[in-house]
Amino acid sequence: MAGAFTNTVFGFLRCYLFLAVAGGAAVAGYTPEQLVTYVWVAQGLLAVVLLWGPPELADRIRTGEVVADLLRPVHPVTSMLATDLGRAWHAVLTRCVPPVLTGLIFFEPYLPVRWHTGPLFVLSVLFAIVITFCCRFLINATGYWLLDVRGPIMLWTLGSGVISGLYFPLRFLPEPALLALWLLTPLPSLFQAPLDVLIERDATPVQLGIVGVQAAWTVIMLLLCRYVQTRAERRLVIQGG
């Protein structure tokens, strides 16, 4: 309840800020109604996509409990991803609905008009959840080498919200910077992609292309997680035993 309330309050602040910047006109291709939808759905997805989760894996590495994960018949990446998908579904029911309903009641949001936008948005959010899990996994996995992961986590906390499209639409940035972010990093796939798909910012082929880029990053990140886990297991030493 506290989390949903906090997200709703910040939704009001962000929504009025964006509307003030827009001044009743379109900005960077977004109409005021699309900006309203962008802000409130982003607030709803905040706990679903979960950029900033607890460092559970890093703590298990530090305490040595990760050994129990390695003894299970399921690969650690698969096991943790399944747990995270269950968490995300619970967050959809408890943390996503209240802010989105608030946006529908107090503002005039943009509602999708294309029949395929709904399924594409659901698929895009699913890709965003998996990619975010992979990012958090890789940051926590630095604990295999560093033991203390506070530095990487702080760097992730400061940067991820800015270049994932959570704080503001990345379309506000210059085109070359935006293109580099899309092609070189998975971060725009976390918030910018599902939100742009939902508000139908682009034509249908571009919507499909955005989800296609997310699918490619999902495969790359999952393979990278399994590679890092394999490399880490080769040099893992549990202190004290």
Image (cartoon, rainbow, N blue to C red):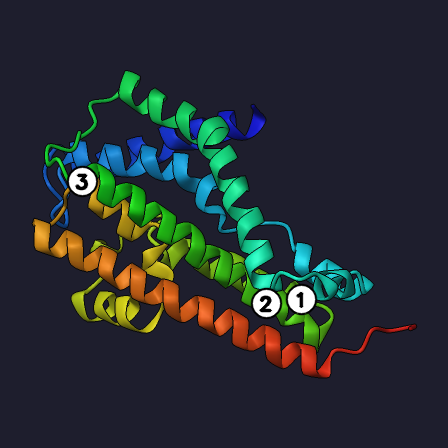
Q: Earlier in the sequence, mark 3 or mark 2?
A: 3
Report the residue marked by disc 3. 117
Marks 2 and 1, how far apart at CA? 6 Å
Q: Quick check: marks 3 and 2 in contact, CB under 8 Å?
A: no
Residue 131 % position (x, y):
42, 58
Horizontal side, residue 12 vs residue 48: left or right: left
Query: Which mark is nearer the camera, 1 or 3?
Result: 3
Identify the amino acid type marked 3.
Thr
Give amino acid for label 2: Pro
Residue 88 in the image, given as x and y percentages of width and height: 49, 41
| Location of residue 171 in the rendering, given as x and y in whole percent from the top left corner | 21, 55
Q: Look at discs 3 and 2 and give the one toward the viewer.
A: 3
The local crowd at label 3, few if under 14, some if 14 to 19, many if 20 or more residues have their Cα within 10 Å, is: some
Q: Amino acid at mark 1?
A: Val
Q: CA distance from mark 1 to mark 3?
A: 39 Å
**In the image, what residue occupies the spot 10% across and 41% down?**
26
Do tag 2 and tag 1 residues touch (Cβ < 8 Å)? yes
Q: Secondary structure at mark 2?
A: helix
Q: Earlier in the sequence, mark 1 or mark 3?
A: 3
In the rendered image, which residue does mark 2 sit on?
A: 152
Of residue 22 and residue 100, the one placed in the foreground of this image is 100
Q: Quadrant of the C terminus?
A: bottom right
The quarter in which the N terminus is drawn is: top right
* Mark carried by residue 149: 1
Horizontal arrangement in the rendering, residue 128 relative to residue 145 (left or right)? left
Q: Among all residues in the image, which is located at the extreme right?
A: 240
The crowd level at tag 2 (other Cα within 10 Å; few <14, some 14-19, many 20+) is some
The local secondary structure at tag 3 comes to helix
Residue 234 x, y percent position in the rendering: 69, 83
Farthest top residue in view = 105
